[in-house]
Amino acid sequence: MKISIIGYSGAGKSTLARKLGKIYNIDVLHFDSVQFLPGWEIRELEEKQRITKEFLDSHESWVIDGNYSKLFYERRMEESDMIIMLLFNRISCLHRVVKRYKKFKDKTRPDMGKGCNEKLDVEFIWWVLHKGRDKSNKERYKNVLSQYADKTIVIRNQKQLDAWMKSNSN
């Protein structure tokens, strides 16, 4: 089983990836942990691509969470048995990001790179509310849905996610 989880920041991609990894007993790759070095420094693209390729090449089954279009995006979508799009609204995502910040303040989340203590700044709020929802991202999601409609699940809110989880965790 290969599962890609894509969608907006704060929608719960990493949490869902962890849960599905446990349900299906398969390895999970969180792209935020690939992206960031300690202190929120961004890893070089070539290194991120190497890490991603090694993971893809060495696993028959996986869950990968994150968009990261330069990290074998087309390969991931093509190889996925299931693509889950978490397209929650802006306010829900912002609420979830604030809740996450309160829970992990001064700590590193399990799905984040080491030494990246949870933070909430104006730049990230802007990303959650606007920049991460720009035309190119929306277009990418439309293309995935168009090209892989038979294996793509679109989830727009927590109620839909809960219902989907209940029907797929048995």
Image: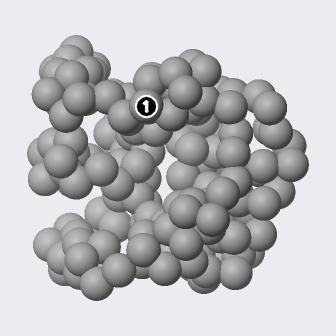
Above or below for 138 versus 96: below
Label 1 belongs to which residue?
41
User: Residue at (37%, 45%) from the top-left corner?
Assistant: 3
- How was this image coloured? one colour
The answer to whether residue 62 is left or right of residue 144 is right
The answer to whether residue 162 is left or right of residue 148 is right
Locate the N terminus by quadrant.
top left
User: Residue at (77%, 50%) from the top-left corner?
Assistant: 100
Above or below for 151 versus 62: below
Crowding at mark 1 (Cα within 10 Å: few <14, some 14-19, many 20+): few
User: Residue at (46%, 38%) from the top-left corner?
Assistant: 32
Instruction: Spot the residue most to the right.
Output: 102
Q: Amino acid at mark 1?
A: Glu
Observer-nearest of 48 and 26: 48
Query: Residue 146 placed where, x, y %?
Result: 19, 80
Above or below for 90 versus 34: below
Query: Residue 152 placed where, x, y %?
Result: 34, 67
User: Residue at (14%, 72%) from the top-left corner?
Assistant: 147
Q: Is residue 85 visible?
A: yes
Total of numbered circles in the picture?
1
The answer to whether residue 120 is left or right of residue 98 is left
Q: Is residue 160 visible?
A: no
Query: Residue 6 placed where, x, y %?
Result: 40, 58
Q: Secondary structure at mark 1?
A: strand
Observer-nearest of 25 and 107: 107
Residue 54 location, quadrant: top left
Above or below for 68 versus 116: below
Query: Residue 129 placed where, x, y %?
Result: 56, 77
The answer to whether residue 8 is left or right of residue 62 is right
Observer-nearest of 98 and 167: 98
